[in-house]
Amino acid sequence: MPIRWLPYALIAPAALFLGVLFVIPLVQTGALAFQVHDAWALGNFTRMTGDLNFADALRNSFQLVLVAVPVQLCLAMGMAMMLRHLQRGRAIVLWVWSIPLGISDLAAGLVWLTILTDQGYLNSVLFHLGVIAAPEGWLTYETPFALFMAVAIAEIWRATAIVLLILVAGVQMLPKEYGEAAAVFGASPWQAFTKVTLPLLRPSIQSALILRTVLAFEAFAVVMALGGRNFPVLVSEAYAWKHFNQDTGVAAAYALVIMAISVAATLVFLRLLRTPVEQQT
Amino acid sequence: MTLRRGIFLSGIGVISAWVLLPIWLIAASAVGGQGQISAWPKPLWPAGGTLDGLASFLAIEGVWKATANSVAVALLTMAMAILLGAPAGYALARFNFRGANLFRVLVLMTRAFPVAILALPLTVSFIRFGVYDTAFGVALMHTTLALPFAVLVSASLFQAIPRELEEAAWVFGCTRWQAAMRVVLPLALPGIVATAIFAFVISWNEVFAASVLTVRNRTLTAYLLAVLSESPMHLQFAGGFLLIVPSVLFIFLVRKHLFAMWGIANR
Amino acid sequence: MTKHPRTLLIVSAALLALAAPVRAQQSTVFLSSQLRPVESAQIMRTQILKGYAGKVEFVPEQPAELVVRLQAEKQAGKSTISLVAGVHGELQPLVPAGILTPLDDVAATLKARGFAPELLALGKFGTDHQLMIPWMQATYVMVANKKALPYLPAGADINALTYAQLADWGAALQKATGKRLLGFPAGPTGLMHRFFEGFLLPSYTGGVVTTFKSPEAIVAWTEFAALWKFVTPNSTNINFMQEPLLTGDVWVGFDHIARVIDALTKQPNDFVTFPAPAGPKGRGWMPVLVGLSIPTGAPDVAGAKALIDHLTLPATQIITASTVGFFPVTSAALPPDLSPGMTLAVSAVQKTGAAKDGIATLLPVGLGAKSGEFDKIFLDTFQRVVLRGEKPDAVLARQGAALQALMAETGAPCWRPDPVSAGACQVK
């Protein structure tokens, strides 16, 4: 086989696979979204935007991403820096901190449900501390802020680990000399962090942000477990339209909206956090 | 120990507690049985824990079969993701060819699309091709989820292996295939193993595609989703806890490789 | 994991080869939208199917998924399902799709079982053939904790309660305990929409679709929104009333009998059961008929027919009633020595059926795959009027238009208690 064709032969199986199992269903979904009664129309989109929950779902999805993802990034950054300064027991600490990585969102939702129900552990602790006298509701439609915080905290708990791993990996590859040089020139640890470490970590931050944002827009089981109908997000609405209302057209329209937002977010991060050419390896 | 050091270590402790405490609490709920669910205020240490909840959960017909299905699906996903992904990764790492970027974009796009919906149009095709309601069918779907990771991670793995090593092997008379097999693959193997296990975890945890594409041969998560949504709380918590146990073990098994994978993946 | 790369490849290849044959051995696949909760499914497998000679695989499935699955199998021309069980309204969309096979021979053979004639007639779905054999029936009931009884409004008969009295009761409970103790199953998988379709609106308006935006409907929603002040805010998270009844979060709750049975059997001494309240027009209530059908192309028709025979046996009907709380559709008589919890359940269902002012309401008929959107119209109205406090007349005008469009699209004629219509049911 001529060498020119070798790379194509190597990617062919994967490309073919994704073509059959991703592109074709994607096109089919697109067709579903733009068809009403087998005719091309925008009816599904007008139904979607005209729905009671659409504005809420859009707002909730964005709020969740805008709150959870930055917190995850900062938290993971702090954790990565702590790990860097830890001499003994690093492996065990890293293991503990990575555990949520393997926990499905179905299970993570249940974990936080056991804490936040009326007779849950949060209320019990508050009661033992004398803060409250009777169970307090956290997950009802009357406490939208508490509900939002609950969902955001559960998301942060579950998905900080993946950001941490990406950052830890990036930190590991930082040349030690840079930090030493900064110290020689009299930079404070904070200056060294913001002026040296952060810029060097830019590629890792970029991957982490893209991955987390895309996955946060798809967060579903956690939201369903804690929020149910009280906290609609785009994916849960897509699911509800498909599952309860049996309208695949509107569900497909939601899917396309989610995909458009994810792709747009990816492009924004790629542009904002471009790695300068001289820094590329 | 200085004050600074103390603050530092307690920071580590607080974050570890933040990760572990919720898991401890669901474990307490899982062994507490129905009494623990309605108890108010709850003791933080489960009083007189019983394994009834867990036992009655494990006694539900089909749980073991679903577990076996989950394992089969996850192993297949792992195998397919690596077999398809590693060669593509090698191509991206070693060759400059037209369409490489298009391929990268295709691979990235798969992650920007909600899976639950993707599975819809597939149902009918799956029935037609006889892979509906089989472990293999679900594994096909899960491979589309795991493949992007496999391709991109293995590309960076291969990139990290100096091209010179491979070229030296050619000089010593190896064919391209032999050089790849004898020189490159052994070096990349730890990273590939980590990727494979990550593919396993992705598949193990996936719920929606698995529920849509199966009737009888449900995976454990799909089975749980179906039964849990309508079960009493103590059974739900028992099920949730049992889902977490293997995850914790997985992460423990791959803890050494996690670095290998992400460290190089980021280059 | 292996150290040698080739071994990895061989292992993977072997796994791929093994994949195809992962299939269960031959047995009759029984797909059911009922008895989904783990515990009832377990009872189904271990007790109700116990005496049956053949091998059965009982697969519970969400109602919406059940229909989709049968349609997908029909579309692809390959079937795995031999017997399907669902509520009358769930199986109905399968009739125009031609998915149900005629069971006239089965109905003839089983004549001696003594099916209630009106139930058997429902199984024809307005066609000339018996497409569904009745299996079991149920309804929705109210359950109250005995602690709530002292606060029952003076002069109120718990078995002939009105919505006004229920509101007063809730107010008295809140005054006495400081907590809102009424409960409705308005969670994501709760059956709240059935409350509006089968209970609240028929009680106030005497209809469902035709009277959707009538002045009586505005009264119904206004009064329900007022009553909601005494309903626990957790209601929008409640899917099954038995949980909050057992924890004591709810003292007076409404739900499907199968979704409170756990509370009744676990603590029969703590609860009383009674029919849903009445409104100005009467006591709206919704009987639930579960039936059995065989889809076209079923791989094991003989097994499916044998299963129908087993499930309608008098002994099986009685076991079903005494274990999962669904009642016989045949002449099988319930034994007098039912457990205390079951006695509670039975009495509630009997009192509901026997109420003099009862207005029996059918599940939506003829909406096909649109029944989910029908439910959504009621749930959206609930969300707007009750949870968000919007003006009922404006909301009903808007949702009424959506309902009218839906009825026109499906062409579904009116069903009980709306008066018989020639064409599609019209919102007046």
Image (tube, coloured by chain):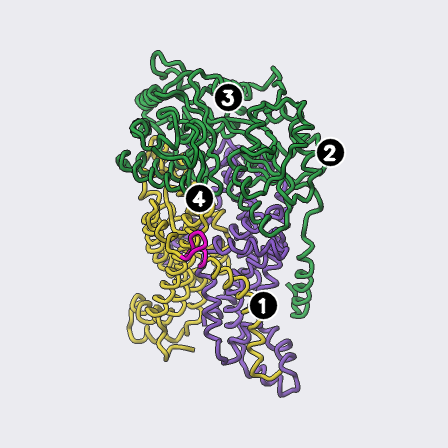
| Chain of the residue displaying label 4 | A
| Residue A38 lies in the magenta-colored region | yes
Report the residue marked by disc 2: C53
Q: Is residue B24 above or below residue B267?
A: above
- At x 68% / y 44%, what residue is drawn? C299
| Chain of the residue displaying label 3 | C
Report the residue marked by disc 1: B84
Label 3, label 2: how far apart the Cα atoms are: 32 Å
Give chain A's shade.
yellow
The reply to whether label 4 and label 1 mark residues of one chain is no
Mark 3 residue element: helix
For badge 2, the amino acid type reads: Ala
Q: Which mark is residue A245?
A: 4
Which image quadrant is residue C109 in?
Answer: top right
Q: Is residue A141 above or below residue C345?
A: below
The reply to whether label 4 and label 2 mark residues of one chain is no
For badge 3, the amino acid type reads: Val
Mark 4 residue element: loop
